[in-house]
Image (cartoon, rainbow, N blue to C red):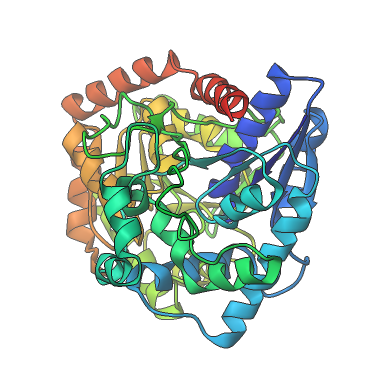
Amino acid sequence: MRVVFLCKGSRGDIAPVLSLAVGFKQNNPTDNCTLATHACHRLKFDSILKKNDVDFMAVDDLGKDSGPRSLEKLELQVCSGRGFSKSQQQDRLSEMHGSLRACRGADAIVFNLFACEGWFIAKYFDVPCVAASPFAVTRTPPVTFESKFVDAYPDLYHRLRNSKQGEVSYGDIDHWMWRLYLDDFGEFCDSIGLPVCPYAELTPDDRLHPSTTLLYGISPQVIEKPPYWPENVVLCGYWFLELPDEPINDIKVYHPASGYSTLPDFFSSFKGSGERPVYIGFGSMEELGFFSSVDCVELLGVLNEGLVQCGKKALLQLSPNSNLLKTWEMLCKNFQNCNIHCLMEYVPHSKLFPLCQSVVHHGGSGTVGMALRCGVPQIVCPFMFDQSYWGDKVMWMGVGESVGHPRSLSAESFGSALVKVVSPEVRNMAASYGKMLLGEDGVKFAVHQLIKEIKRR
């Protein structure tokens, strides 16, 4: 059997789906598993793919101006209800045909919510499919979606509203399947001879199709399934990708005053002080264009001032070509006290977080989950999508603080959050969640669900 794991987005979107592919392959060693995603991700995960005998197929051309950045920017347009330009439509259509090529010969398709064409491709090849998302859907359809749906398909709307258990329902549409009704998917379906509107081809005598299962890579210890979610939505536990244990002895940390030190030496310098560094990282937010030159100057100034006020030092993880890095190099020469050290190489969060006293991040679902698993307090600076939800959730759980969008951040509010998250109450609560999550195996549970769904279809 060949199973294609079709996914798009940033590293944080791809890694959880790859963990499912690896888990599936380990559970079914004679089956073929293929990761289909952006070409730019191949090198990032090459060692894991080879070690676990998972094939790779690109859905786009390496070097083309597409990939994670353009994809997630388009998702912002989707959520606001704005349409796409003609060139954007053509780029998306081309990438969907790349997904079609990658899925040819598949016996089952697992797709994430940035690659919803996987649902149509499964219909085209008449194979089972399962949706898999490392983040919970907190975005509702555009405000006019339901009224337009009722006007266009009144009979279908009535049937979906009154569907039987196990059949697709309007709850599925409202929760996540509304994306399948976007114009660019219609153009894709038309190009391969599929009906452009899901389920609109059904006659009154036809039974509604079974609902498509949606697996969430989030712990039920963290989110309790609300009663209004569709019955086929399953909380599996986090999907953490187990990475090769590569040495970090030669990885360098940079400071403009003291120069380079190795990462182990940097952490060793805190021994005896009773302190640990604060981790700061914003994932793919800069890649998505959220940091202008002005934003970088203001943000780094605020972060450093807050650290100085509290007498704390931070480890800022950046890419070598980062605008934040260039701004940091410029500003730190002018700071009287620069309490920010820079790490310019990729090191897994699972290695860094346990060595830090707190974690400052953008509020991505996976980063929240890893901080919880490591039992480390966190401070969330949300940018977009579900990140504000996770900021609120972190506060509600008592494991950290949310300080709002970085553009509204002040040194005082950041410094206050740094102090609050190291209180005994917050540290103990974070540690208790860490103990709970260490006993979970979200990948194993999800793979079991995948096998069950594939056999059921």
Q: Position of residue 312 (x, y in %)?
A: 33, 44
Residues 421 and 54: in front is: 54
Name the residue: 38% across, 39% down.
368
457 left or right of 279 in image: right
Q: Quadrant of the N terminus?
A: top right
Q: Which quadrant of the structure image shows residue 266?
A: top right
Q: Residue furthest front?
A: 205
Residues 100 and 10: in front is: 100
Q: Position of residue 38 (x, y in %)?
A: 69, 58
Name the residue: 32% across, 67% down.
149
Name the residue: 52% across, 24% down.
449
304 left or right of 351 in image: left
Q: Quadrant of the C terminus?
A: top right
Residues 60 and 197: in front is: 197
Residues 192 and 242: in front is: 192
Name the residue: 29% across, 64% down.
154
Let me know if residue 120 appears in the view. yes
Q: Residue furthest bottom?
A: 86
Examine the rendered structure and indicate whether residue 201 appears above or below residue 212. below
Let me know if residue 345 appears in the view. no
7 left or right of 150 in image: right
Q: Position of residue 367 (x, y in %)?
A: 43, 41
Q: Position of residue 115 (x, y in %)?
A: 57, 55
Q: How many marks?
A: 0
